[in-house]
Each structure stands twice: as structure tokens, then as C-alpha cells.
Amino acid sequence: MVKFDTQAMQRPGIEGIQYQQGDLAGCELRELLLERWNRQCAYCDRQNLPLQIEHIQSRARGGTDRIANLTLACEACNLAKGTQHIQEFLKDQPDRLERILAQARGSLKDAAAVTNTRWALYERLQTFGLPMEIGSGGLTKYNPSGRKLPKTHWLDTANVGRSTPAVLQVEQVHPLIITAKGHGSRQVCRMDKFGFPRTSAKHFKRIQGFTTGDLVVAVVPSGKQAGTYVGRVAIRTSGYFNITTKGTTIQGISYQYCHPIHRCDGYSYHFEKEVGGIPPTAEAASILPPGS
């Protein structure tokens, strides 16, 4: 009839409030700190490097684990500060010291407003009767790590929420990457580096049924540019267009060799192989640029 402390068996040394914290406790805390401290080291402003959770007042000097006492620091700054008082560590940077202390004590009214707004949005969406699920940034990070999946935008999307299956079959999946490109330029003509016109004013928005930004496939049967090209077209009054594929731009392709795949809507589309070594499906390969 002996009762085992299963949490202590998995996490020796656990005590107090730690018993109430699940696997996501650290993930949610880190996500909150990343947002609060702009995803950069509080002491040197460096970004795009591993950041550690740092106690503004070290625990050796009585600091607690409250959110107001936590920030983010790179390893170098964390080691340099050690157990020093922050006033001592930043005595030569009074502006930074003041900013860190103010941000640590800052009001949470903005966070409260966003929280209320997202719940209002959730309740309104519920009125449509569609299946809905609540997720979080911490959970979205936790799910891929437990499934040993690489960090990509489309896999993050696949891992949102608690309904994410234990095993995701991603080897045969090739995501469709959609990039906002806009609907062209409002410039009447292009300028050189001195600000003088280097092209004539635009007169035509459509040439031979094509407009700049259309997604086309061009099959050139012979000549120096023989081959098949898939990409966005830039029209020319001469009828010889430029086609921008995923990796390069091919110039001087006759409109006669171009066949529209998707009319310009302000976005570009291509399939991308991000996971596994399996080539794209036949359907995906049909609109992939050469060499993808």
C-alpha cells in the first residue's frame, strides 16, 4: 500500500510549488520573457543567439523566481554578472539600469488588454459553430521538441494545440510557401541612382494577356534559353518577358512560350522540400522551378 512520489522520482529535489508545475511551465515562462524583453539580451542587446533566463537580483542575494525579477541574458553577460547586484554590474550604464528596472516593474495593462481581446475574439468565433481549439506559444514550442521535429514555420503551425497527434507523418509533406509580393510599383518609371528617369513611363498593364506578377510556365524548345521555367513574369511591350524563378531571372522569353498558371493576386507560390530526402510529388513538381 506504499504510495510512490512519482514526480520526485522523475525530478529529484522537487519541492513546494514545483509540484503544481507541468511540463509546459518552463516553455510558457520563456515565451513570456521573450516577448517582454524583445527577444534580446537585456545587458548587451544582442539578438539571434541562445538566451538564458537571468535573475535581476540573484538568488544568492535573496532574489526570487517572480516574473518581475527575471530577464534574459546571453551566456557571456550572465557569467559576467554572476551574483553581483545589478546596480553594481551596470554602474557604468545608468540609462540601461534604469530601463531594466522600469521594465521589470512595468505595468501589465497592455498584456491584460491583449488577453481580453483574444478571449473576445474566441467567443465571437465560437458563434460560427466551427471546431475550435486554444493553443499557446509555449505549447507550440513544446510539441515539436517532444516529437524531435526541426524548427520551421509550417511545422510550428502543424504543432499548435493539444490535439497534435503523438506522431506526425511529415516525410511526404512538401509545404506550399506563399509570399506577399504586392501588386507592383506605383512609380511612373524607374530611377537611376541620381534620381533621374532611366525608363519611359508605363503605358500598358497587360501585354498579350499577361500582367507583371502572373505565375507562368515557359517551355522554350530551342536556342540558348531552351528549357522549362516556372516563375513570376515581368511583362515588356516588346513581347519578350523576364521570368523570375526561385533562384534566378531569365530574360527575353517570348510570350508565345508562356502559359499562365496563376494570375497575379499579390502573392508568389512555390512548393518547398524542408523535411526528409524524398522528392516532391508529381503534383508539386509540376509547378516547382527547375533545380528545386
Image (cartoon, rainbow, N blue to C red):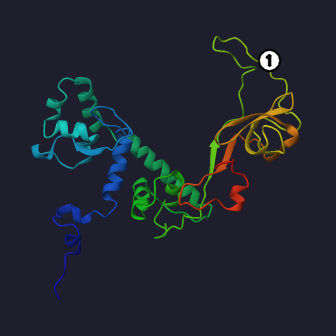
Binning the other alpha carbons within 10 Å of mark 1 as few (below 14), some (14 to 19) or many (20 upward) gives few
Say which quadrant the N terminus sits in: bottom left
Whole-percent x, y for residue 277 in the image: 55, 60
Q: Residue furthest bottom?
A: 1
Under mark 1, the amino acid is: Ser
Q: Identify whether 122 is placed above or below 147.
A: above
What residue appears at the point 49 percent right and 55 percent down from the top-left corner? Answer: 156
Whole-percent x, y for residue 79 in the image: 19, 40
What residue appears at the point 76 percent right and 18 percent down from the top-left corner? Answer: 199
Tell which of 70 and 260 is nearer to you. 260
What residue appears at the point 29 percent right and 31 percent down from the top-left corner? Answer: 44
Q: Residue furthest front?
A: 223
Whole-percent x, y for residue 143 in the image: 42, 62
Question: On the picture, is 263 further left or further right than 267?
Answer: right
Question: On the picture, is 93 further left or further right than 239?
Answer: left
* Badge 1 element: loop
Task: Examine the image and state in which quarter residue 268 appears.
Answer: top right
What residue appears at the point 43 percent right and 44 percent down from the top-left corner? Answer: 113
Question: On the picture, is 246 further left or further right than 158?
Answer: right
How many marks the image carries: the answer is 1
Q: Identify whether 181 is placed above or below 137.
A: above
Whole-percent x, y for residue 208 in the image: 89, 36
Task: Examine the image and state in which quarter residue 278 appears.
Answer: bottom right
Q: Can residue 105 be seen from the camera position used here? A: no
Tell which of 114 and 169 is nearer to you. 169
Q: Can residue 242 be seen from the camera position used here? A: yes
Residue linked to disc 1? 200
